[in-house]
């Protein structure tokens, strides 16, 4: 059955480049492999539409409704999806590089292996989204909600996650080197095997986070909260941990060589067998911390906050 909208024939493989389809009712239509490059789809209803392998490069999808749409492996480079509703949408393998997804709605969206490099996702809602293996290099997630999202194996090199919500998110084996996580909320996040080399985590909340053997080499962790976090075997060599909170944290076997723990809260922290060679513990509070078997060679411990009884823990 021939479907026409605004004089355009709607069918798989249709040539609709620069088409004027703003506000069009295109729900459940089949536009697989269609050419919609630079098309005007502002406010269009594409709920349940099939757009797999379609070319939507440079298209205007601002405020578009794409609930449960199938957009796998489509090209959306430089498209505008500001405030678009992509709830439960399938974007597996799609190219979303340089896309504007400011304030977009993406709960439960499937972005497995999608390319979102340099995409703008400021304030976007990605609750429970699947971003496994996604390319997120230098993407802007400022203030985005990624709670309970799966970012296993994702590449977030140089990404901006300032004030992002990553509570209960899974970031196993994710690459976050040089990423900006200033004031990000990573409460109870699973960060096993993640790479934070050179990342900025100043003011980040990592309460209860799982970070065993994580690479935090030279990371900026000033004022970060690791209350109850698991950092066993983590590499924190050269990290700036000034005023960080490690209360009840597990740091057994961790490498803190030359790390700065000035004014850090280390109460009840477990540093068994940790390497604290040349660590700076000036004004740190490590009352009841456990340093059994730890290497404190050349550690700087001027005016530490502990009682004589705490010496038994060294």
Image (cartoon, helix red, strand yellow):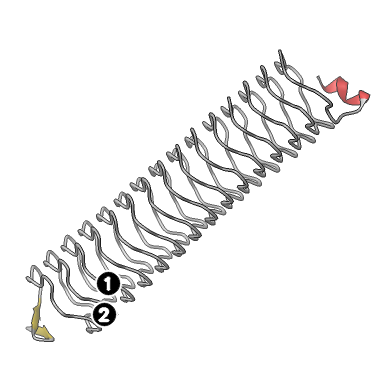
Say which element carries label 1. loop
**Residue located farthest toward the right when viewing the structure as drawn:** 308
In the rendered view, tell whether residue 172 sits above or below residue 304.
Answer: below
In the rendered view, tell whether residue 181 sits above or below residue 264.
Answer: below
Say which element carries label 2. loop
| Horizontal arrangement in the rendering, residue 88 relative to residue 253 (left or right) | left
Q: Could you tell me residue 96's position as x and y percent?
A: 28, 57
Q: Label 1: how many residues lie within 10 Å, few (<14), some (14-19) or many (20+)?
A: many
| Horizontal arrangement in the rendering, residue 139 relative to residue 238 (left or right) | left
Q: Is residue 121 visible?
A: yes
Q: Which mark is residue 270?
A: none
Which residue is label 2 attached to? 44
Determine which quarter of the picture holds residue 287: top right
Number of callouts in the render?
Answer: 2
| Horizontal arrangement in the rendering, residue 56 relative to residue 88 (left or right) | left
In the image, what residue occupies the spot 91% across and 28% down? Answer: 307
Q: Which mark is residue 61?
A: 1
In the image, what residue occupies the spot 83% across and 27% down? Answer: 304
Label 1 close to label 2 by CB (< 8 Å): yes
In the rendered view, tell whether residue 284 sits above or below residue 114.
Answer: above
Quadrant containing the N terminus is bottom left
In the rendered view, tell whether residue 110 sits above or below residue 45.
Answer: above
Q: Earlier in the sequence, mark 1 or mark 2?
A: 2
C-alpha separation, residue under disc 1 versus residue under disc 2 = 7 Å
In the image, what residue occupies the spot 79% across and 30% down? Answer: 289
In the image, what residue occupies the spot 32% across and 53% down? Answer: 116
Q: Could you tell me residue 160's position as x and y percent?
A: 45, 50
Quadrant containing the C terminus is top right
Q: Could you tell me residue 288's position as x and y percent?
A: 84, 31
């Amino acid at each position: 059955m021939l479907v026409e909208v605004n004089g355009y024939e709607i069918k798989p493989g249709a040539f609709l480049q620069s088409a004027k389809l703003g506000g069009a009712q295109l729900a459940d239509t089949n536009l697989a492999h269609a050419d919609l490059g630079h098309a005007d789809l502002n406010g269009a209803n594409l709920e349940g539409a099939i757009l797999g392998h379609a070319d939507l490069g440079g298209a205007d999808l601002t405020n578009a409704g794409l609930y449960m749409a199938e957009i796998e492996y489509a090209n959306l480079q430089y498209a505008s999806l500001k405030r678009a509703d992509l709830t439960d949408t399938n974007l597996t393998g799609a190219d979303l590089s340089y896309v504007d997804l400011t304030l977009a709605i993406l709960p439960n969206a499937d972005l497995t292996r999608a390319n979102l490099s340099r995409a703008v996702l400021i304030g976007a809602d990605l609750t429970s989204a699947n971003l496994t293996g996604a390319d997120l290099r230098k993407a802007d997630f400022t203030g985005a909600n990624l709670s309970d999202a799966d970012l296993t194996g994702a590449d977030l090199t140089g990404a901006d996650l300032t004030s992002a919500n990553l509570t209960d998110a899974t970031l196993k084996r994710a690459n976050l080197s040089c990423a900006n996580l200033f004031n990000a909320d990573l409460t109870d996040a699973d960060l096993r095997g993640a790479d934070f080399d050179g990342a900025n985590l100043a003011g980040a909340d990592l309460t209860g986070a799982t970070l065993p053997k994580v690479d935090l080499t030279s990371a900026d962790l000033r004022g970060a909260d690791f209350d109850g976090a698991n950092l066993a075997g983590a590499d924190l060599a050269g990290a700036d941990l000034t005023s960080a909170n490690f209360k009840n944290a597990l740091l057994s076997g961790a490498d803190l060589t030359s790390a700065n723990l000035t004014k850090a809260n280390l109460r009840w922290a477990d540093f068994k067998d940790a390497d604290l060679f040349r660590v700076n513990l000036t004004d740190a509070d490590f009352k009841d911390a456990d340093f059994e078997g730890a290497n404190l060679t050349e550690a700087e411990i001027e005016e530490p906050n502990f009682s004589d009884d705490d010496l038994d823990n060294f």
